[in-house]
């Protein structure tokens, strides 16, 4: 569905109002959505669609996937999460996966950012360089 520029701008402005200290506030978002549904301004469906997209992108930005060749112990997990929390903030949703094909090291995906410190990634980069 194509969204008008006015509806997209309105959704961005409302999304900005739903944030507290740079983080999405669920209660404010619920209030904004309830008032939009109640008042039904022009293009309210497009505004709600754009708000849904912005919210989905924000949640994906907070999702972290940590892949390792072996199961990580507790202190290693804490070090990884602490380092990521310094860079991306404390409210991350972390998921751990064991991928034996990595051979060693870690591959960390935070939203669209990928940090590949795995042995397989290094070998692939070396092979591409030749």
Image (tube, grey):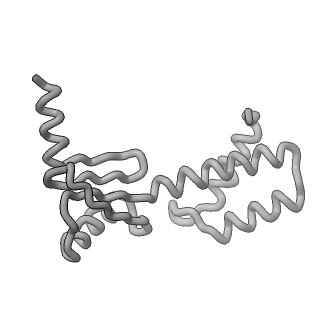
Q: Residue at x 74, y 67 (%)?
A: 31
Q: Quadrant of residue 100?
A: bottom left
Pick the front one: 58 or 11: 58
Query: Is residue 89 or residue 2 the one in the foreground?
Result: 2
Q: Residue at x 41, y 45 (%)?
A: 112
Residue 53 relative to residue 83: left or right: right
- Is residue 73 placed above or below 58 in the rendered structure? below
Q: Work out whether 36 lies above or below 43.
A: below
Q: Quadrant of the C terminus?
A: top left
Residue 39 appears left or right of 75: right
> Measuring 58% from the left and 53% from the top, which residue is drawn there?
56
Count the marks: 0
Q: Quadrant of the N terminus?
A: top right
Residue 86, given in percent of the width and then of the height, sits at 31, 63
Residue 18, x across and y down, in percent:
64, 61
Image point 82% across, 57% down: which residue? 36
Where is residue 97 drawn, in percent x and y?
A: 31, 61
Residue farthest front in this picture: 100
Residue at the farthest top position: 130
Relative vertical location of residue 2 with respect to residue 14 in this rendering, above or below = above
Name the residue nearer the viewer: 29 or 105. 105
Q: Nearer the viewer, residue 22 or 41?
A: 41
């Amino acid at each position: 569905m194509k969204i008008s520029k006015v509806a997209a701008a309105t959704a961005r402005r409302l999304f900005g109002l739903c944030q507290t200290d740079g983080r999405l506030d669920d209660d404010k978002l619920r209030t904004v959505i309830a008032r939009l549904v109640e008042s039904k301004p022009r293009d309210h469906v497009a505004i709600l669609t754009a708000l849904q997209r912005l919210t989905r992108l924000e949640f994906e930005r907070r999702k972290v996937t940590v892949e390792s060749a072996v199961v990580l112990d507790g202190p290693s997990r804490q070090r990884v999460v602490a380092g990521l929390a310094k860079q991306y903030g404390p409210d991350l949703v972390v998921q751990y996966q064991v991928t034996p094909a990595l051979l060693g090291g870690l591959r960390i995906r935070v939203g669209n950012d990928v940090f590949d410190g795995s042995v397989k990634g290094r070998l692939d980069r070396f092979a591409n360089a030749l």
